[in-house]
Image: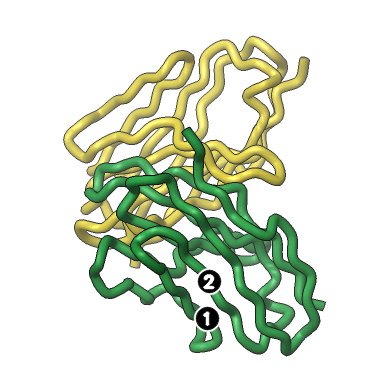
Amino acid sequence: GAGVSQSPSNKVTEKGKDVELRCDPISGHTALYWYRQSLGQGLEFLIYFQGNSAPDKSGLPSDRFSAERTGGSVSTLTIQRTQQEDSAVYLCASSLAGIQETQYFGPGTRLLVL
Amino acid sequence: KQEVTQIPAALSVPEGENLVLNCSFTDSAIYNLQWFRQDPGKGLTSLLLIQSSQREQTSGRLNASLDKSSGRSTLYIAASQPGDSATYLCAVPRGGATNKLIFGTGTLLAVQP
């Protein structure tokens, strides 16, 4: 079966522009996570969706970051007014519900803000 | 605040050697610990998940151990192969009964043919 997919695979944008990153989780996975991987900070948790519950946004670095998950499936991470420090690889993962469930990661979107 | 560190940051070994990667965490109240592998330009692949009640998990040539009281985990790779070259990351849940993960700093492994 298909794994987690993300698009675009690479994105170059100018400082101040908005970007949208997309994640298609594995079918049937109710949990979805966004992480960011940058040279200076390593891999950081951003936001977590579980079923119909309100998302856990505790990892978002600023109010320029937001995410949606429509119909319990596809998720979009939006970064408004991008800054150079937003340059990173944005990784999405999905899993079945439950703390002991393995997370399956997508290939990531490499974002470069010029 | 939970912090996860990995030693060494980088490791180069000749093919066939057995090796150990180390992971330490500051808060021992964890539900589980996971080891992941990341190939260049790719996402993460889960290798092993050890629950807090377990001390070891094995998968093929990989063996992961967990010592909660000392805040340590090791990943043992037997008979290393060039295909094992990758970055290895350990991760623990980010506080309480949650699957949000805090990742270690990673170990970049190179297995020389």
Name the quadrant containing residue A45: bottom left
Q: Mark 1: few, some, or many residues within 10 Å (few <14, many ≥20)?
A: some
Q: Position of residue B6 (x, y in %)?
A: 51, 45
The green-coloured chain is labelled A
For image coordinates 26% across by 61% down, the residue present is A51
Q: Position of residue B10 (x, y in %)?
A: 66, 39
Which residue, given by chain and number where applicable, does mark 2 sit on? A77
> Badges 1 and 2: C-beta atoms under 8 Å apart?
yes
Pointer 2 indicates a residue of which chain?
A
SS class of the residue under badge 1?
strand
Type of the residue with mark 1:
Phe
Chain B colour in the picture: yellow
From the image, which quarter does the C terminus of chain A lie in?
bottom right
For image coordinates 79% across by 70% down, the residue present is A12
Type of the residue with mark 2:
Leu
For image coordinates 65% across by 34% down, the residue present is B86
Q: First in sequence, mark 1 or 2: give its number.
A: 1
Q: Nearer the viewer, residue B72 or A24?
A: A24
Q: Position of residue B45 (x, y in %)?
A: 51, 37
Which residue, given by chain and number where applicable, does mark 1 sit on? A65
Q: Mark 2: few, some, or many residues within 10 Å (few <14, many ≥20)?
A: many
Front position among marks 1 and 2:
2
- How far is the residue under mark 1 from the one under mark 2? 7 Å
Asked if residue A55 lies left or right of residue A22, the reply is: left
Asked if residue A33 lies left or right of residue B105, the reply is: left
